[in-house]
Amino acid sequence: MPKRDKLKSILIIGSGPIIIGQACEFDYSGSQALRSLREDGIETILINSNPATIMTDPVMADHVYLLPLTTTSIDQILKEHPQIDAVLPTMGGQTALNLCIEADEKGIWKENNVEIIGVDINAINITEDREQFRNLMLDIGIAMAPQATATSYLKGKEIAQEFGFPLVIRASYTLGG
C-alpha cells in the first residue's frame, strides 16, 4: 500500500475468534499493519472481538475495542472517533471483509466520510463470485481450469461426470479455501 500523507487515523477490523480455516495469519498480518501505521505516525483504532491475540495487546494500537464485529460496533467507534479517515478490512480475513461490505451497504462509510483502503467493494464481490471472477480472467486473457457452478447435489454429480476426477470443490462468496 503506497503511503498516503492525508490519512491520519485508520480503523483496522480484526478477524474475531480463531476458527477452523481462519487462524493466526490474520493476527500476524494485523499486528504488522498496526506497527507500520503507527511508525508512520498514523493513529490506529482496532476493533476485534477476540481478546486472545497479539493485535489486541494495548501497546499495538492507539485504541483497542473488544466489541462484537457488527455494524453497530462500527457505528459506535466512528461516533467516538470522528477523525477516522479510512478503514483497513484486509487484516481480518473473511469476517472483516463481510463486515466491511455490510457497513458499505448500510452507508456507514459514506455517512462518516471514511475511505475503504487496501481493497474495494467491487473487487471483493468479483473475487467471491466464482463465475464473475472466471469471466474477468477470461476477458483479460488469463487461462483458467475448466469450472462450473453446482447449486444442487445432482448438478454437482453431472459436473463431476463431465469433468472427471480429480475435482476441486469450493464454496462461492468466500475468499478462503
Image (cartoon, grey):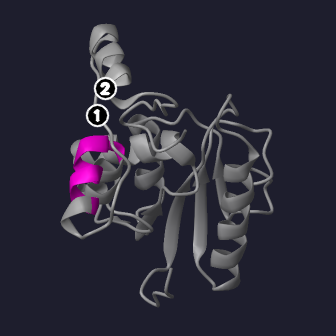
Residue 39 placement, left or right of 54: left
- Relative to the observer, which residue lies in front, 90 or 59? 90
Quarter location, residue 160: top left
Give the main secondary structure of the magenta stretch.
helix
Secondary structure under tag 2 reads: helix
Work out whether 162 lies above or below 54. Answer: above
Q: To which residue does mark 2 refer? A: 162
Instruction: Classify mark 1: helix, strand or loop.
Output: loop
- The amino acid on which the numbered mark 2 sits, given as a three-letter code, is Glu
| Callouts 1 and 2 close, C-beta under 8 Å | yes
Q: Nearer the viewer, residue 130 or 5?
A: 130
Above or below, comparing residue 82 to residue 95 in the picture = below
Picture residue at 23% right of the left edge, 70% below the top: 140
Task: Farthest residue to the top: give it.
Answer: 154
List x then y, in percent, for residue 50.
70, 37
Q: Which residue is mark 1?
A: 148
| Quadrant in which the C terminus is drawn | top right
Q: CA distance from mark 1 to mark 2?
A: 10 Å
Q: Relative to residue 11, is residue 134 drawn left or right?
A: left
Residue range (magenta): 128-137
Q: Nearer the viewer, mark 1 or mark 2?
A: 2
Work out whether residue 108 can be spotted.
Answer: no
Q: Nearer the viewer, residue 105 or 77?
A: 105
Expressed as whole percent of the image width and height from the top left, the position of residue 103 reads 32, 45
Please name the residue shown 34% across and 64% down the image: 114
